[in-house]
Image (tube, rainbow, N blue to C red):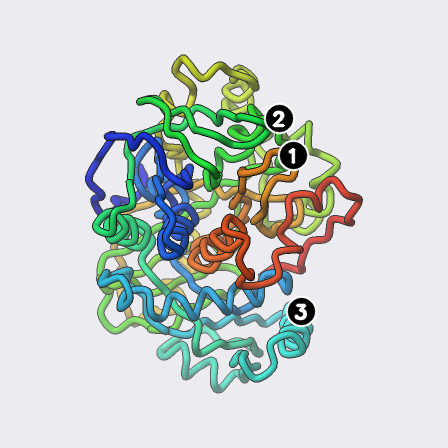
């Protein structure tokens, strides 16, 4: 069972019309609704389950610039800037703090990748980037009491952490107080058009007229868009995580070693993961999209395990087209709640305890897993859809969405209103998968 998220009151009282409907109540959806409402637009957000019920509450909780894909770097830096003032601006508690993030290794090839990334990042961001290489001695200071040592790494002091179970619900509650309609549980079945452009959404509770729709449905976005005739390449990978009971005297800095990763939580416990190891179920879409994902598969050799199982048959039986006047899978599957891969996630804890034996026995409070929505090049789609004016997509964040969330939402709002964009959106356009642009994948964290 997934982690318990902070409460957002349920409400299914639909407005007759708004300017924009946001589909999806994760961090991307609530951030989009936030910045659209700040532009003076009337906004309704529809979530089929609970706010942050899926991956937005199940991730590591890192807010980082460290080792971001170069194409995401400026967006990540803008997002970190927004995170720093979000609590104060909205009068909420997301748990954000600047703790620093450290990536370490004893492998020369990994350290060389770190150096290449740092060179590129400094060329792009200049003095605005505070990431630096660190020696074994400095790593020891950043990992006080650790029984393991590392040759080197890179460290970003201004990187932070926040609480995934708090952040999106806190933003949603603040938006409701400001007049934004937060509708849950309220599945959107599809989009209606008039004169070749978006004119309304049809929900399980009725129709809302609107001029624009933002699809921020995470793992569901490809399926939702398919019913509109919009081809969105996206597959899912399953990542497993655990959290511990409070641990007195533990490290403050968030760290990834390659074998395990951790960050301190507000309650004094730790969120621990088995590095970048994930599982991917073989599904019908895995065959349909195989050639688009060849580069991604190459980049994940050794860290991703493929599995054939029940999900193949579940997705095979789903209709790829459906009418809007009858119940859909969005109403029967409110929340994707996969089982964690126990040996993976527990190995992360074992490695953490070996690194910090002075902490003694560490008690596990909960284990869970979540589905990350991954694009062929592992960077998001933040884009309008040329074939359907009024439709915008914010999805495919490939495990990076929580930290990037606020800036992604602000960029989506800029695209919807045709304002000067926060960053150049060209790299995030949907059409890159169909206009002949070569698919490339970054070297990875």
Residue 113 is tagged as 3
Give whichever of 358, 416 is nearer the camera. Answer: 416
Q: Crowdedness of circle 1 by 10 Å Cα count: few (<14), some, many (20+)? A: few
Q: Crowdedness of circle 2 by 10 Å Cα count: few (<14), some, many (20+)? A: few
Name the spot of residue 253 as percent of width and height, x first. Answer: 38, 73
Q: Nearer the viewer, mark 1 or mark 3?
A: 1
Name the spot of residue 247 as percent of width and height, x first. Answer: 24, 65
Of the numbered discs 1 and 2, the one sitting upstream in the chain is 2
Give whichever of 313, 291 is nearer the camera. Answer: 291
Residue appearing at x 27%, y 59% in the figure:
362
Q: State whether residue 366 is above or below residue 185.
A: below
Q: Is residue 91 left or right of residue 191?
A: left
Quarter of the image for the N terminus: give it: top left
Badge 1 vs badge 2, beta-carbon distance below 8 Å: yes
Residue 414 is tagged as none
Q: Could you give the CA–CA distance between mark 1 and mark 2, rounded to whole angstroms?
A: 9 Å
Residue appearing at x 51%, y 16% in the figure:
322
Q: Could you give the CA–CA distance between mark 1 and mark 3, rounded to whole angstroms?
A: 39 Å
Residue 269 in sight in this render:
no
Give whichever of 277, 402 is nearer the camera. Answer: 402
**Which residue does the numbered mark 2 point to in the structure image?**
229
Q: Which of the 4 quarters of the picture holds residue 24?
A: top left
Residue 289 in sight in this render:
yes
Q: Is residue 90 left or right of residue 78?
A: left
Q: Is residue 172 left or right of residue 322?
A: left
**Which residue does the numbered mark 1 point to in the structure image?**
387
Q: Which of the 4 quarters of the picture holds residue 436?
A: top right
Residue appearing at x 69%, y 43% in the figure:
431
């Amino acid at each position: 069972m997934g982690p318990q998220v902070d409460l957002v009151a349920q409400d299914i009282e639909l407005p007759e019309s708004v300017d924009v409907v946001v589909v999806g109540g994760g961090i991307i959806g609530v951030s989009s609704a936030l910045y659209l409402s700040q532009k003076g637009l009337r906004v309704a957000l529809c979530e089929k389950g609970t706010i942050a019920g899926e991956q937005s509450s199940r991730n590591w909780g890192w807010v980082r610039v460290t080792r971001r894909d170069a194409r995401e770097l400026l967006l990540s830096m803008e997002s970190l800037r927004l995170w720093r003032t979000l609590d104060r601006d909205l009068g909420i508690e997301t748990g954000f703090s600047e703790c620093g993030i450290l990536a370490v290794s004893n492998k020369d090839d990994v350290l060389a990748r770190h150096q290449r990334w740092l060179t590129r990042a400094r060329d792009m961001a200049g003095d605005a980037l505070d990431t630096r290489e660190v020696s074994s001695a400095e790593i020891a200071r950043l990992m006080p009491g650790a029984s393991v040592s590392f040759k080197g790494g890179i460290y970003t002091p201004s990187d932070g952490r926040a609480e995934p179970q708090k952040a999106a619900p806190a933003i949603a509650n603040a938006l409701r107080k400001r007049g934004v309609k937060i509708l849950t549980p309220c599945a959107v079945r599809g989009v209606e058009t008039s004169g070749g452009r978006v004119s309304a959404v049809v929900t399980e509770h009725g129709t809302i007229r609107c001029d624009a729709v933002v699809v921020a449905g995470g793992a569901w976005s490809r399926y939702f868009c398919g019913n509109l005739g919009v081809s969105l390449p996206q597959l899912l990978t399953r990542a497993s995580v655990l959290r511990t009971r409070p641990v007195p005297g533990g490290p403050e800095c968030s760290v990834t070693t390659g074998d395990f990763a951790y960050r301190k939580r507000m309650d004094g416990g730790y969120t621990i993961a088995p590095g970048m190891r994930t599982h991917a179920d073989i599904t019908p879409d895995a065959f349909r999209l195989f050639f688009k994902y060849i580069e991604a598969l190459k980049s994940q050799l050794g860290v991703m395990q493929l599995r054939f199982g029940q999900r193949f048959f579940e997705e095979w039986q789903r209709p790829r087209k459906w009418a809007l006047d009858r119940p859909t899978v969005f109403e029967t599957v409110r929340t994707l709640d996969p089982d964690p891969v126990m040996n993976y996630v527990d190995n992360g804890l074992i490695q953490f305890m070996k690194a910090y034996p002075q902490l003694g026995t560490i008690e596990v409070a909960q284990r869970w897993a979540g589905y990350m929505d991954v694009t062929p090049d592992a960077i998001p789609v933040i884009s309008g859809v040329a074939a359907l004016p009024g439709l915008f997509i914010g999805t495919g964040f490939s495990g990076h969405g929580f930290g990037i969330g606020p800036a992604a939402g602000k960029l989506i709002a800029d695209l919807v209103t045709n304002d000067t964009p926060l960053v150049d959106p060209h790299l995030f356009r949907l059409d890159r998968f169909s206009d002949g642009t070569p698919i490339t994948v970054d070297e990875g964290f």
